[in-house]
Image (tube, rainbow, N blue to C red):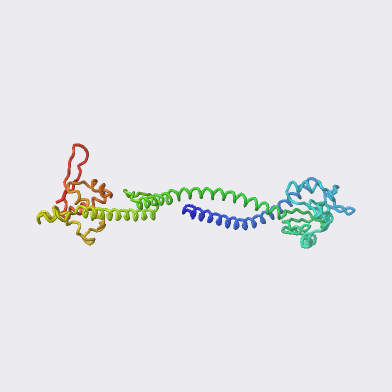
Amino acid sequence: MRSLKNQILILLLGSLVLLAASFLGVLGSYMKDDVVAGAIIKARTDLATCGEIIDKTYPGAWSVKDGNLFKGPTKISLNNDLVDNLSRLTGDTVTVFIGEKRVATTVRGSNGERAIGTSVSTNVVQTVLKDGQTYVGEADVVGQWYHTGYVPLRAENGDIIGMFYVGISHAYEQEIITRSLIHMAELGLALTILVALLAWFFIQRVIVYPLHNITLGTRDLATGHLTQKIKVSGAKEIGELEDAFNQMVEQIQSLTGKMNQTSGSNAGYDSTESNVYSDTEQEPLTRLNTAGDIGEEGLPKGLNEATYGQIVQFLQANIRPLSAEEVAEGVKLTRVTVRHYLEFLEQSGVLKSEQKYGTVGRPVKLFIPL
């Protein structure tokens, strides 16, 4: 059977793991939306950046000559250096089109070769080549989905002769999300370990140690070796358990005292000797002999009948002036508890008290049987 400490830790860690998993799931969903929005912004920015670089590197108008695309006097068709440099700069795939056909690209086909001569998706053709607008959004690029940006290329007379494209793959998007979630998971793991250590320390100090001390006290009580009440510190419920245990100890000690006194009285009883005593000799010597007859209803609130009987029995066995400390030591109770009972006996006329002054120290209050 698992210990209480282990069960609490397992429950706590399980809750933390469940909470962390739920948090990462929700965070991943929000991050996906943010990454998509970021990819769209990146596509727009990269289109503008690449357009400026091309204009400064290759001045002149766009044109088509002999089926090839030119920028000023520079041939752009099959110009791998241009698209590769722009791809390294932006991290995107880059393509230049004549009409809807790729003439220079970093996009690879299923065979691993550059996808020269392949066509763009029909929705892009309508928006860019026919309507003359910039297209930013998801598009099918040679069988794979990308966050894309397409801008029309216009000849010197304003006619649309091609397109320029940048694309951000979904794999790149997923990589960003995965990397971010891994960082969050590492942070969450560190926090979970920290919380677990703090919880372990708290459980040990506030729950496990007090319960362990009470358990040891119970074992000592069962073997008859417990002579003092236990004292533990912990939560309110632990304190209540401590009080209940100490009350049980008090009751058992009281009962044991009664049994011992009864056993001693029976052992010392001699019927022959009792017959030779006169009636005067058998009368109570002090008022303590009748003090034990009081019932529970005769005691003030807060005093216990069994404890009261235990203290009276001790006083009956020790007919002499006694201090509260001596009585407390004799009945194995606290001095404060014993003093309440002695003061009640004093108020009842069974005892009287006197101050005993020594040469040094505080005076001692003695209780004397009447």
Location of residue 86 with respect to 132 vertically, above or below: above
**Could you tell me residue 251's position as x and y percent?**
29, 56
Front one among 355 and 216: 216
**Could you tell me residue 347's position as x and y percent?**
17, 54
Q: Quadrant of residue 296?
A: bottom left
Residue sitting farthest toward the right: 66
Front one among 348 and 168: 348
Residue located 20% across and 59% down the image: 294
**Could you tell me residue 222's position as x and y percent?**
36, 53
**Could you tell me residue 370's position as x and y percent?**
14, 51
Front one among 128 and 286: 286
Q: Quadrant of residue 31?
A: bottom right
Residue located 28% across and 54% down the image: 256
Q: Is residue 159 visible?
A: no
Residue sitting farthest toward the front: 272
Q: Quadrant of residue 302?
A: bottom left
Q: Is residue 281 visible?
A: yes
Count of marks placed on residues: 0
Is 193 left, or right, of 249 in this rendering? right
Is 122 left, or right, of 293 in this rendering? right
Residue located 22% across and 51% down the image: 314
